[in-house]
Amino acid sequence: MVSVIVPVYNAQLYLEKCISSLMNQTFSDIEIILINDGSTDESLSVCEACQKEDNRLRIINQQNAGQGVARNQGIRAAKGEYIMFVDSDDWVDKHIVERLMHSLLDNDADISVCNLYRTVLNEERIAVKYEEVFYDECLDCNQDKNYVFNISSYPVGKLYKTELFKRIDFSFPGHFFEDVAAIPILFAYAGRISFTGEGLYFYRNHSGSTTSDFNKLDDRIRCLYSLVNMFKKHNLFEKYCDEMEQYICRRLKINYR
């Protein structure tokens, strides 16, 4: 079974489309864990309405604590052998779970990755490939250290073995841009990472998204400290020091822009 974890915070405009795209997956052995992170709009009502249509949905309510804490709740609650993250303002292709699962199993990988498309609310039909472009291939992580910081740190658009999270006692930090700090450590522990060239995840860019919020500059910097501390905690700092330095420089240039 695949546990799909969806942090939800004030996403009523986008949430129904997100959940529907998960309910209609061609791979049916899934549970959809909706973490309501203290929403003050009608997001909870949307979740409850969808739950009445599909008993694979589970709702967990928590006080507002941020996306990272919500994802941690989902990881603890997950019953599946595999985990996928989806943001509540995005949606996915109906084949995403099936295709990522095939890619992972066929290549005996710990993580499988697909391409992302970027779109906006009023022009959803216009979607463009987002950042890097992957092709059908598999990476043996013991042969190349660079991959740890060269694959996007977005938690979405990926399928993970649940065992990977448990093996390293993984958790996201509680600040924004938590993925920048946390996802690379999963790559560092993965034995093999497989890729599919298909674009199966639709990332919605809008003014309310975290990446569009210039008031969170402190967290853009804080996440880099968390990244370093994460690798030190796992005694991997020395091994990846040079690659991490290049990655941090790239992130600082993004912050500067």
Image: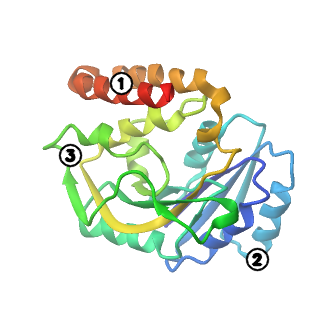
Image point 82% across, 69% down: which residue? Answer: 49
- Vertical placement of residue 14 versus 244, above or below: below
Callout 2 touching callout 3 (CB < 8 Å): no
Camera-near label (2 vs 1) is 1
Place residue 42 in its image quadrant.
Answer: bottom right
Residue 175, image x, y percentages: 60, 28
Crowd rating for badge 2 (residues with CA inside 10 Å; few <14, some 14–19, many 20+): few
Amino acid on which disc 3 is placed: Cys
Place residue 54 in its image quadrant.
Answer: bottom right
Q: Residue furthest front?
A: 257
Q: Is residue 136 visible?
A: yes
Place residue 247 in its image quadrant.
Answer: top left
Task: Kindly identify which residue carries mark 1.
Answer: 249
Amino acid on which disc 1 is placed: Cys
Say what secondary structure mark 3 lies in: loop
Task: Kindly identify which residue carries mark 3.
Answer: 141
Amino acid on which disc 2 is placed: Glu
Q: CA–CA distance between discs 3 and 1?
A: 23 Å
Say what secondary structure mark 1 lies in: helix
Camera-near label (2 vs 3) is 3
Q: Earlier in the sequence, mark 3 or mark 1?
A: 3
Task: Kindly identify which residue carries mark 2.
Answer: 53
Callout 2 touching callout 1 (CB < 8 Å): no
Q: CA–CA distance between discs 2 and 1?
A: 47 Å
Callout 3 touching callout 1 (CB < 8 Å): no
Residue 101, image x, y percentages: 38, 68
